Amino acid sequence: MKRLFVLFSLFACACRSGPPPQWVEGEVPGPSDRVLAEVTRLAMEAQGFHVVVRGFDPLERVASSVWEPDLHPFSGEGFRERAKVRYEPVAPGRILLGVRVERQINKNIARPLELDHADWAEGADNPVRARAILQYIRSTLEGTLTFSDDSASEPVP
């Protein structure tokens, strides 16, 4: 009986945890913290995410946007998303960026269009928007355009 209860508890906890986070990662040249923070803010805002606190959290090296809602008249169709960018130095002059766009689904049946009554449940992350943010940052920091398909081409400034 105890084993059954333990198994049921573990199963219930696993179901509530939601889908695993999907971080999109890429290595880029390591600018100053100030430049990285500004480029990150511009990248998030280009994708429609508003940043209230400028810069990265100095302890966790993470910058995040506020939740951006996209409500829908049917339960389970409305959602909200928030962008997070983290970095860590990997070599002199190089950093590893991780970008995640979290998503939560509005499960409210009675009032799905009212933000004050939303019932948020964890949803699958949005890796497409995360890749767009990462590409914006990468393009801005690298400063040159290279074509990987054509090995004979030179970088274009």
Image (tube, rainbow, N blue to C red):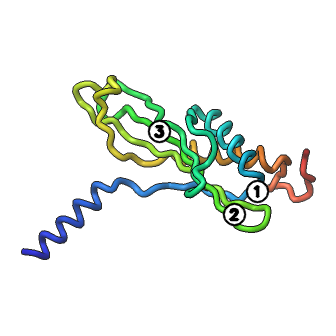
Type of amino acid under label 2: Pro
Type of amino acid under label 1: Gly
> Image quadrant of residue 60?
bottom right
Task: Tell me the SS state at disc 3.
Answer: strand
Q: How crowded is mark 1: few (under 14 residues within 10 Å), some or many (20 or more)?
A: many
Which residue in the structure is indicated by mark 1? 30
Q: Position of residue 122 (x, y in %)?
A: 36, 47
Which numbered disc, 2 or 1, marks the residue that appears first in the sequence? Answer: 1
Q: Which residue is at a point 61% across and 38% down the rendered structure image?
A: 44
Q: Where is residue 108 in the image (x, y as percent from the top left)?
A: 26, 32
Q: Residue furthest front?
A: 58
Task: Check whether the beta carbons of the residues at disc 2 and disc 1 lie within 8 A of each other.
Answer: yes
Q: In this view, does 39 lie above or below 16?
A: above
Task: Check whether the beta carbons of the residues at disc 1 and disc 3 lie within 8 A of each other.
Answer: no
Would you say 146 lies left or right of 101 here?
Answer: right
* Image quarter (top left, top right, bottom left or bottom right) of the N terminus: bottom left
- Foreground pick, 32 / 77: 32
Type of amino acid under label 3: Glu
Question: Any mark on residue 81, and which?
Answer: 3
Task: Tell me the SS state at disc 2.
Answer: strand
Q: Distance between the residues labelled 1 and 3?
A: 27 Å
Would you say 5 lies left or right of 103 here?
Answer: left
Q: Which residue is at a point 17% across and 66% down the rendered structure image?
A: 8
Q: Where is residue 2 in the image (x, y as percent from the top left)?
A: 10, 75
Which numbered disc, 2 or 3, marks the residue that appears first in the sequence? Answer: 3
Q: How far apart are marks 2 and 1 (CA)?
A: 8 Å
* Image quarter (top left, top right, bottom left or bottom right) of the C terminus: top right
- Foreground pick, 51 / 34: 34
